[in-house]
Amino acid sequence: MSVPDRILVRLVSPALFVGSSADGTAADTDVVTDEHGLPYLPRHRLAARLRAGAVSASAVFPEFAGAVHRLFGRGRSHGRDRILRVGHAVTGEEVRSAVAHALAGRTEPLRSRLRRSVTEAYTTLESGVEIGPRGAPEAGRLRTDRVLSPGLVLTAALTWSVPPAPDDRRCLAMACLATAQIGLKATRGRGRVDVRLAFPEDPDPNATTLAEAGLARSGDGVVVP
């Protein structure tokens, strides 16, 4: 029986996936990138947000309690007891291959400049007054954040150690639907995302996720049967 083999993360608003970039971009807060300068969402951050979404779904559907533990492990351990492994959420294979080809054989400093250009193609800079520890603006202090541009779609591979039970699949789909924000500055509207499940060559991940969650479409939206 076919099972979902990937998760798609689409950025709806600018996002701060904070970390170290390949070459640094002179911003106070940078985005995490791979060795080619391409942004990605580390697996542990995605798994943590999915687990939080699953826990919130289990508050409405108590029968998911066991599925949460099977999918994501117990507590924050992400231990070996879980049946699901979530990969890094990365750009598409064609993009990664093209960038790797463009960088192959390049020497410094050209290679670093090209990597920075790759990062800048997916990001923008935001400047604002720095906020102090008490939540008040710090007079005369500005900071610059590099943020991912909305519209970017990242894909995370799913690896199952055993075939998931129906409740496991439904719980994972609900976790995806419940995951609406990833990254910093959530209170400022940053990091809003659509997270969806997909099968290989899936033409409609949104429909797939709704079906896996056991939700039905109506003229006014989605209903729980």
Image (cartoon, rainbow, N blue to C red):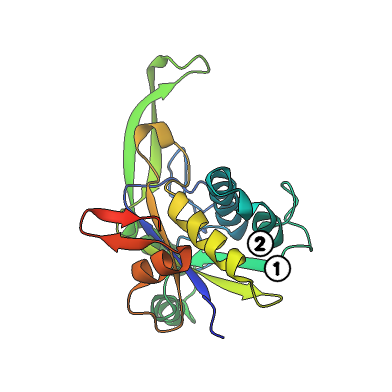
Viewer-closest of 90 and 164: 164
Mark 2–mark 1 distance (CA, rounded to whole Å): 5 Å
Task: State which tag comes first along the sequence, 2 or 1.
Answer: 2
Q: Amino acid at mark 1?
A: Ile
The part of the image, by quadrant, that contains residue 191 is top left
Could you tell me if residue 209 is visible in this image?
A: yes
The part of the image, by quadrant, that contains residue 209 is bottom left
Q: Residue at x 46, y 17 (%)?
A: 135
| Mark 1 secondary-structure assignment | loop
Position of 224 relative to 76 (above/below):
below
| Mark 2 secondary-structure assignment | helix
Can you identify the residue that label 2 sits on? 71
Local crowd at mark 1 within 10 Å, few (<14), some, or many (≥20)? Answer: some
Q: Check contact, mark 2 vs mark 1: CB within 8 A.
A: yes
Number of numbered callouts drawn = 2
Local crowd at mark 2 within 10 Å, few (<14), some, or many (≥20)? Answer: many
Instruction: Locate residue 170 relative to residue 101 in the image: left or right.
Output: right
Q: Residue at x 61, y 65 (%)?
A: 168
The percent coordinates of residue 89 (x first, y second) are: 50, 64
The C terminus sits in image quarter = bottom left
Q: Amino acid at mark 2?
A: Leu
Viewer-closest of 26 and 144: 144
Q: Residue at x 38, y 80 (%)?
A: 202
Instruction: Locate residue 99 relative to residue 62 in the image: left or right.
Output: left
Q: In this view, which residue lies farthest toward the left? A: 219
The percent coordinates of residue 27 (x first, y second) are: 43, 42
Checking the image for residue 83, the label placed there is 1
Checking the image for residue 188, the label placed there is none
The percent coordinates of residue 175 (x first, y second) are: 52, 55
Could you tell me if residue 34 is visible in this image?
A: no
Q: In this view, which residue lies farthest toward the front? A: 225
